[in-house]
Image (spheres, helix red, strand yellow):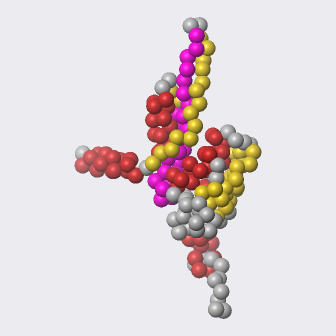
Amino acid sequence: MARENNRRGRDRDETPEFQDRLVAINRVSKTVKGGKRFGFAALVVVGDQKGRVGFGKGKAKEVPEAIRKATEQAKRQMIRVPLREGRTLHHDVNGRHGAGKVVMRTAPQGTGIIAGGPMRAIFEMLGVQDVVAKSIGSQNPYNMIRATIDGLKKESSPRNVAQRRGKKVSDILPKENAEA
């Protein structure tokens, strides 16, 4: 019993820390004997602005219900992305999904988020402040988001690389002017 209450309390506490961004709404119609039936599909990106992000899609007869379903799905499938100094990516990375290709590059402080539409929503929800990104190929928001998430999954921090290779972080990072 106490464990259930603790779990419920934790879930309630986690919810407010996430922010969501509606990326796209699509109205679809089905022609039936009496006319047309309209439905809505929503694409939502959710993140905590501290390195976690996820996306979801929801379909329903009403817009708010579609958004709610998409937000629920996005919260369920969040990924964690390591960020350098909490503001940019550790290294340049490419992502791909279907015909959607994206290129994401690190940027110096003060650059801002230079990215289009759906990619911008992901970076804002992720908490990235400086990044240069370009979408090549598909302009479909679903494919752009999936390609961006694919690229972000490939992102690794020096700590992860050092752990994988069995070395120290200082051995992996480039030396900063040892002579000076």
Rendered location of residue 47, percent (x, y): 49, 51
Q: Is 65 above or below relative to 19?
A: above
Quadrant in the picture for residue 55: top right
As drawn, the residue found furthest toward the top would be 33
Q: Could you say which quadrant of the image residue 90 lies in?
A: bottom right
Q: Is residue 14 left or right of residue 45?
A: left
Horizontal side of 55 relative to 177 (left or right) equals left
- Residue farthest left in this picture: 2
Q: Residue at x 34, y 50 (%)?
A: 13
Q: For the view shown, which residue lies furthest in the bottom direction?
A: 179
Q: Is residue 122 magenta?
A: no
Q: Horizontal and vertical percent for residue 52?
A: 50, 55
Indicate whether residue 45 is drawn in magenta: yes
Q: Quadrant of the C terminus?
A: bottom right
Q: Is residue 172 visible?
A: yes
Image: magenta residue range? 35-58
- Relative to 174, residue 4 above or below: above
- Given residues 4 and 143, the one toward you in this image is 143
Which residue: 65% across, 79% down?
174
Name the residue nearer the viewer: 125 or 71: 125
Image spot of residue 46 (x, y percent): 49, 47
Quarter of the rendering occupied by the N terminus: top left
The residue that appears at 64% across and 83% down in the rendered structure is: 176
The secondary structure that dominates the magenta segment is strand
The relative height of residue 39 versus residue 109 in the rendered view (above or below) is above
Task: Give the mark count.
Answer: 0
Q: Is residue 156 visible?
A: no
> Horizontal and vertical percent for residue 119?
61, 49
